[in-house]
Amino acid sequence: MILGVEVSTRGLSFDEVASKFSSRLKQALIERLTDIAWAKAVSGAPRRTGYLASRIVKNVGEGRASIEALAEYAIYVEKGTRPHLIFPVRASVLVFEVAGEMVFTRLVRHPGTRPNPFMQRALDETRGKVEETFAGLWRELIG
């Protein structure tokens, strides 16, 4: 399952104002907000291996954009997991190391994981930058 968010100007209080300007301004706003959200998602992703952060991508189109975390396990990091049992799939036992000792077992009782909503945090922080970003673009436009 792919975890993602969409970036657009729909529903923003200045959407009516933005629609009266060129589509170039609106597109620039979407692209800037997407860049901000992407950077915040990448910097907020857990860094144990760096794989999750490396699999966060931007998709920019005309009038819309999205950010997606393509790592297979991204949704489990974002939402967390309940306690669950882990059984071997391709073998008769699970094998892993604990404190330097090899462990062989047919079952692991995983305690679950707390949510780490790195994508939601990126979205929330980016929402807080909308007016500032629009103002910056406006200043650039009028010189």
Image (cartoon, grey):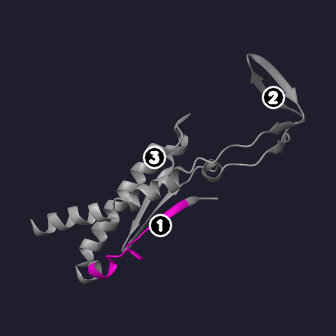
Q: Secondary structure at mark 1?
A: strand
Q: Which residue is mark 1?
A: 6
Distance Cα–Cα, label 2 vs label 1: 40 Å
Q: Position of residue 98 (x, y in %)?
A: 75, 22
Callout 3: 10 Å neighbours few (<14), some, many (20+)? Answer: many
Residue to which mark 3 is pinned:
42
Q: Range of the magenta residues?
A: 4-17
State which tag comes first along the sequence, 2 or 1.
Answer: 1
Which picture quadrant has residue 139?
bottom left
Looking at the picture, tell me which residue is in the foreground, 128 or 104.
128
**Label 2: which secondary element:** strand
**Which residue occupies 74% across, 43% down?**
112
Residue 100 on image: x %, y % = 74, 16
Decide which of 95, 127 is in the foreground and name it: 127
Residue 102 placed where, x, y %?
80, 20
Inspect the image, locate mark 2, and give the three-letter code of the amino acid beneath it. Answer: Val
Mark closer to the chain start, 3 or 2: 3
Q: Is residue 15 left or right of residue 78?
A: left
Q: Relative to the observer, which residue lies in front, 97 or 9?
A: 9
Residue at 55 percent of width and 34 percent of height: 49
10 shown above or below 141: below
Q: Amino acid at mark 1?
A: Glu
* C-alpha separation, residue under disc 3 versus residue under disc 1: 16 Å
Mark 3 → mark 2, Cα distance in angstroms: 32 Å
Contact between marks 3 and 2 (CB within 8 A): the answer is no
x%, y% of residue 124? Answer: 45, 58
Residue underneath mark 2: 95
Task: Classify mark 2: residues with Cα within 10 Å, few (<14), some (14-19) or many (20+).
Answer: few
Left or right, 33 with respect to 25, comes to right
Q: Which label sits in the foreground, 2 or 1?
A: 1
